[in-house]
Structures are given as structure tokens and as C-alpha cells.
Amino acid sequence: MPLTVAEVFRENADHPAERSSPLMQALLLGAASDWDAGGITHAALQPFAGDPPGSALPLRFAAALHRLVLTGRAPELAEHYPTVGGAADPEGAWPAARRVLERETEDVQQLTGQPCQTNEVGRTVPLLVGLAEVARRTGEPLRLLEIGASAGLNLLFDRFRFGEVWGPPDSPCRLPDPGIPLDLDGVRVVERAGCDPAPLDPRDDEARLRLSSSVWGDQVARFRRLQGALQMAGSHRVPVERAGAAEWLTRRLDDQPSAQGVPVVWHSIVRTYVDPDEWRQVEALTARPDVWRLSYEPAPEPGARGVPLRLFGSGTDPAGDVLAHGTGHGPPLSR
């Protein structure tokens, strides 16, 4: 029997990432209780009661509320959102959110209906670890190909600053040191490209707002990283092609640009959104002997340790060489 909306929200609130956000915990658990009580949440979210598990309904709902905060339409809720300077106790966030939901029911419903769309630049921390390893093993320059690239921000990774160890010191996007010894001298990208079924243009105000809304309202460091990456993308944008993963990879892997390099296919927290048949095509395409694949996807087994960064390529374990573990948002990493 499919889970109810309340059950989906409670299950999501128990994920390790959500447990790190008191605000998300308060919103998701409050909405779940309100649904069970037949409150305004039930009226607003009823159209999505049959959404498939991978549609990220709780995250879409939270993004809708954050958007109202960012656009100044929910001042009572903004008091609980550090991303806009709020400092009130997160435990009081749900009563404020409920008042907003009663006032803005139709708009919250319309915004919740939009597909989940994030571009978590924190995941460039495991990306850097993976690229350093491919460069070490091959000694070749790299062709970085990202599937599920959203606005293409992660393709700008070498314009970000990682602690005090790598990247332009004056970059507006600052990320933690990977915390893992790396030889970064060989990391040289000669091509970068991405695809997404619904790409966003980071220069577009609406796209920037959608991405900003998807960050959780009490995670200020993530919010600032995103704003810095969006600033960089204003002048250094990498266009993302509107295409499915398998069809796009088929073309890109057969394309040999004048600047030769090793193809490195990168994806992070994307697999759940891709049809299983198409994913099997992706795995077949990237199993070619001249292709490397960096996978940053949650492990399927219950109780797994964080999110593994796996490297697939010549000489690796069939299940991928695990290079590090991180969180759904990237750092901190550990071996």
C-alpha cells in the first residue's frame, strides 16, 4: 500500500540529512501531523498524494515555503529562517508556516507542483577528490561530462575555493577543504559539458530563485556557497543541454574534440530521478574501456555509511572503487 503524505514526510524527516536541520525537522513533522488532523496541509497537498516516492514531495513543499520567505511574502515565517537573518526558535516554525499556508494555499500548491530542482555545489568537494584520482591514474587531461547538471554550477568547480588548498583565493564560492590528502597538480579539464531534462539558466532571476529556495532555510553556509556559485556563473556559465542522460551520453562519448582527453562522466544524487531502463543504458555506455565514471549516489543498503564516492573505470572493482564517503550535500568527507 502506498505511503500517505504524512508517512512520506515523517520518513523524510528521519533521513540523516534532514536530521541535521532542525528547521526541516520542524516543518516536515508539523506538516505530517497537520495532514493527519485534516488541516490546511491536507487541502494544499492532496493533489500530490499519489506522487511516486522519488518525486521528493517534502523537499518541493519546503522549497515552496522558502521561496515565499525569500520574496518577502511570509514575514512571520522569515523570523525562523537564518538565510534571511531570522533567529527565532525552529520549534516555532510550523505554527508560522501553517498561517502562511492558510493565507497562500494556492501559491504553495502551485510551487509544490514544480519538479525538485537543486544544484548543490557542496558536491564539488567529492568531485574534486574523484577528478584528482582519475588524473593520478591516467596522467591525462579530463573531459568532464555531468548528467543531471541542473544549472551547470558544479562544472565550474575549478573556479571555487576549497579551504586553503586549491582554487582561486578570491572566489566568491568557498567550500571546505576535502580533508583528504590529494595531488591536484594533474587536474586539468579540457572540456566540460552537462545535460539535464529541465536545465536552468543561472543568469535568469527565476532560475536563481528556484535554486535558492531549494536550500534549507537554516543552512546558511550552503546558501552562501550557492550564491557565490551563481555569481561566478553570471560570467562563466557552462551551457547545459536539455536532454536525457543516455541519449546525450551516446552523442558525447562518440564525439572526439580537437583537444583530446579522458572522458569522466560525473553524477551526484541523480539516479533516483532517472528511469531504471535508462540508467542501465548509462551504466552500459560508461562501461567502455576508455571512459571513467564518478558516482556520488546514496548506497542502497539500509544503514549505509553516508554517501559513497565510487570510481568506475579500467582496473576498478566491478562495484566501483570507494574513494570517500560524504553527506547528501557533500562535505564533510571521510575515507
Image: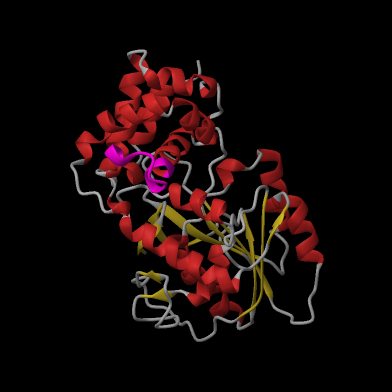
Q: Between residue 203 and residue 177, name the one nearer to us.
A: 203
Q: From where the camera sits, is residue 125 visible?
A: no
Look at the image and tell me in which quarter the C terminus lies: bottom left
Q: Is residue 99 left or right of residue 323?
A: left
Q: Is residue 72 left or right of residue 266?
A: left
- Where in the figure is residue 3, as x and y percent of width and height? 46, 21
Q: Picture quarter containing residue 254?
A: bottom right
- Where in the figure is residue 38, as x and y percent of width and height? 37, 13
Q: From where the camera sits, is residue 110 visible?
A: yes
Magenta segment main secondary structure: helix
- Where in the figure is residue 42, as x and y percent of width and height? 42, 18
Q: Between residue 101 and residue 37, name the one nearer to us.
A: 101
Q: Is residue 152 above or below residue 259?
A: above
Instruction: Residue at 56% x, 37% y: name it.
Output: 114
- Where in the figure is residue 287, as x and y percent of width and height? 69, 59
Q: Is residue 263 above or below residue 182?
A: above
Instruction: Residue at 44% x, 47% y: name it.
Output: 213
Residue farthest along the bottom direction in this orientation: 185
Q: In this view, does 191 lie to the left or right of 251?
A: left
Whether residue 167 appears in magenta in the rendering, the answer is: no
Residue farthest along the left direction in this orientation: 89
Q: In this view, does 200 lie above or below 43?
A: below
Q: Picture quarter containing residue 145?
A: bottom right
Whether residue 69 appears in magenta in the rendering, the answer is: yes
Q: Picture quarter containing residue 43?
A: top left
Give the magenta part as a residue range. Answer: 67-77
Structure colour scheme: secondary structure
